Image: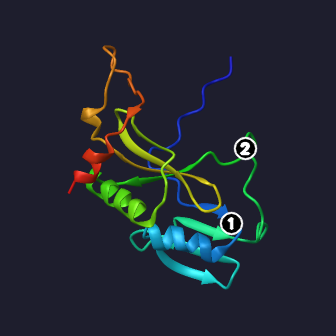
Amino acid sequence: MVPMPSPIDPQVRIGHVHLKVADLDRALAFWHGVLGFALTQRMGRQAAFVSAGGYHHHIGLNTWESAGGPPPPPHSTGLYHVAILYPTRALLADALRRLVAAGVELEGASDHGVSEALYLRDPDQNGVELYWDRPRDQWPRQPDGTLAMYTRALDLAGLLAEQ
């Protein structure tokens, strides 16, 4: 019998993601201009790094292998989406207001019980999820204590009313 490996340490976090983009300025207009990530460094027309809260970078944008390239075709492997976790519902509402003001269309908006999420595409057609987690004591649970996540339509008007 093969022993089960020990679980990963709970302090491990995903530090950053690098996205291949076709046009660096266009990508920055979205990630920096619309979503509001701070530009921490730019390497000419080849790469840029953006973050929240002064971190060196949460998202790297580069054209090293993709300048002028098309997005990946549907039904192919690759990144499904990158998920950006907002600390509060009010900040997720602010993100929605930014998207509306910029004319960015949503692909979906869901209440998962444990979280509320907005789904969209960046200019290079990378999937993006913007979400906030409800407090753990509010997560839906089965009688045995396991999670009972679901997918329901998110009330966008209610989210926009959030201060």
**Residue 107 coordinates in the image, percent (x, y):** 51, 46
Q: Is residue 65 shown left or right of residue 150?
A: right
Residue 129's x, y, as percent? Answer: 49, 49
Residues 111 and 160: in front is 160
- Label annotation for residue 21: 1
Q: Give the residue number, with chain letter if any, for mark 2.
A: 74
Q: Is residue 12 above or below residue 38?
A: above
Binning the other alpha carbons within 10 Å of mark 1 as few (below 14), some (14 to 19) or many (20 upward) gives many
Residue at the front extreme of this rendering: 103
Quadrant of the rendering where the C terminus is positioned: bottom left
Residue type marked 1: Val
Q: Earlier in the sequence, mark 1 or mark 2?
A: 1
Query: Please, is residue 45 above or below residue 112 in the view?
Result: below
Asked if the residue under mark 2 is in contact with the one under mark 1, i.e. CB atoms within 8 Å, the reply is no
Looking at the rendered structure, the secondary structure element under dot 2 is loop
Q: Nearer the viewer, residue 159 or 31?
A: 159
Where disc 1 sits, the SS reads loop
Name, please, the residue furthest toward the top.
Answer: 143
- Residues 9 and 97: in front is 97
Quarter of the image where one finds residue 134: top left
For label 2, count other residues whose C-alpha is less than 10 Å away and answer few (under 14), some (14-19) or many (20+).
Answer: few
Query: Which residue is farthest bottom?
Result: 44
Q: Residue at x 52, y 51 (%)?
A: 120
Q: CA distance from mark 1 to mark 2?
A: 17 Å
| Residue type, mark 2 in image | Pro
Within the image, what quadrant is residue 158 found in?
top left
Q: Give me the disc on residue 145.
A: none
